[in-house]
Amino acid sequence: MISRRNIRVKVMQTLYSMDSAEKEKDMTGSNGLLKDKINETRDLYAYLILFITEIARYAEKDSHQKASKHLPSEKDLNINTKISGNELLWKTLENNSFSKVVKESKLNHLIDQDLVKKCYLKLISTDEYKEYIESLQRDSKSERKILQFILDELLLPDEDFIAHIEEHFINWDDDAEQIQIMVTNYFNKPRDHKFDVILSDEKWNFAKDLVKTVLEKEDLTMALIKPKLNNWDADRIAALDLIMLQMGICEFLFFETIPTKVTINEYIDLAKAYSTPQSGQFVNGLLDNIHKELMAGDKIHKIPFK
């Protein structure tokens, strides 16, 4: 499941896309855009796992190719293919929801076989791989460990692989950290995993409601923001800053289980990561001032989240 921070990024990007394209701010259109943003994360998640399985399965291809030589050596005839039968790998490939995402998003078409081969050859030269194939036994820990090793030590540090991912997934920079956590969590607990559901109903409702509230309460949020701008014209403020301020105010007023401190800290971090160098300080100052004004007017009412 993706995090609340990641959801806020998707909401911010949805609102920004609508603002930039000057699209009519209707909920049908915004929900469609939001769903597309979330599906980008889903597809990237599935693709990263698919690529790992392709590397592991390449052992069979390598064995077949070398055995098919005109004069194969004894070594050519004895390629160890243990990793191709990795139990976690086959649980993944036999998972209906995984197959559904791969098929619907045509992820197989993105696979670069030359890059797969390069990563496989790098894998079989490592001590970790040699230790893995030397054991005649299969256990869930070692099956999981070798796939995690491919991710952590071969793919993520590889500039060619990252370039390949960035070419096909524009959301890599936004989602990379989240995806790594999701893949690791899946390797640790693969049972009955649903790749096509990366949001709980509660988080999906939060995402939809946040978009809806920002759109519906624009007049209210702007009425709170404009007096705090001093000599700044609202039109001169970075569009993302304005969107994050509106999102923060909406969380203050209409999302009663989210502590105000959490809201302020989240949008300071997002402003630093996604907007101008001064945006973190700017968003912090305005949200803090607006928060104090709303508190003084007894307009913020929070309840504990259960």
Image (tube, rainbow, N blue to C red):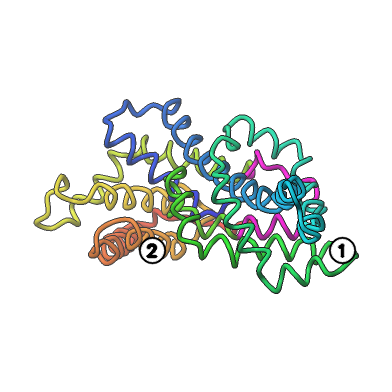
Is residue 182 within the magenta segment? yes
Query: At 25% from the left edge and 47% from the top edge, which residue is drawn?
Result: 239
Q: Is residue 84 magenta?
A: no
Residue closer to the observer: 209 or 72: 72
Left or right placement of residue 273 versus residue 224 in this view: right
- Local crowd at mark 2 within 10 Å, few (<14), some, or many (≥20)? some
Q: Residue 288 in the image: state x and y as whole percent.
A: 32, 64
Dot placed on the residue nearer the N-terminal end, 1 or 2: 1
- Seen at 70% across and 55% down, the residue is 186
Q: Mark 1 Cα within 10 Å, few/some/many (few <14, many 20+)? A: few
Place of residue 252 in the rendered image (x, y in percent of width and height, measured from the top left): 41, 54
Q: Is residue 46 above or below residue 151?
A: above
Q: Residue at x 60, y 65 (%)?
A: 152
Q: Which residues are magenta?
A: 181-200
Q: Marks 1 and 2: CB-CB under 8 Å?
A: no
Mark toward the viewer: 1 or 2: 1
Judged by its main secondary structure, the magenta piece is loop
Expressed as whole percent of the image width and height from the top left, the position of residue 82 reads 81, 57
Q: Amino acid at mark 2?
A: Asp
- Disc 1 is placed on an element classified as loop
Q: Left or right of 3: which side holds 282?
A: left
Quarter of the C terminus within the rendering: bottom right
Residue under pointer 2? 269
In the rendered view, would you say 131 is above or below 306?
A: below
Where is residue 213? Give x, y as percent: 42, 39
Outermost residue toward the left in this view:
231
Q: In the rendered structure, find residue 139 and report the number of the disc placed on it.
A: 1
Figure quadrant of residue 272: bottom left
Q: CA distance from mark 1 to mark 2?
A: 41 Å
In this rendered view, identify the residue nearer to me: 120 or 146: 120
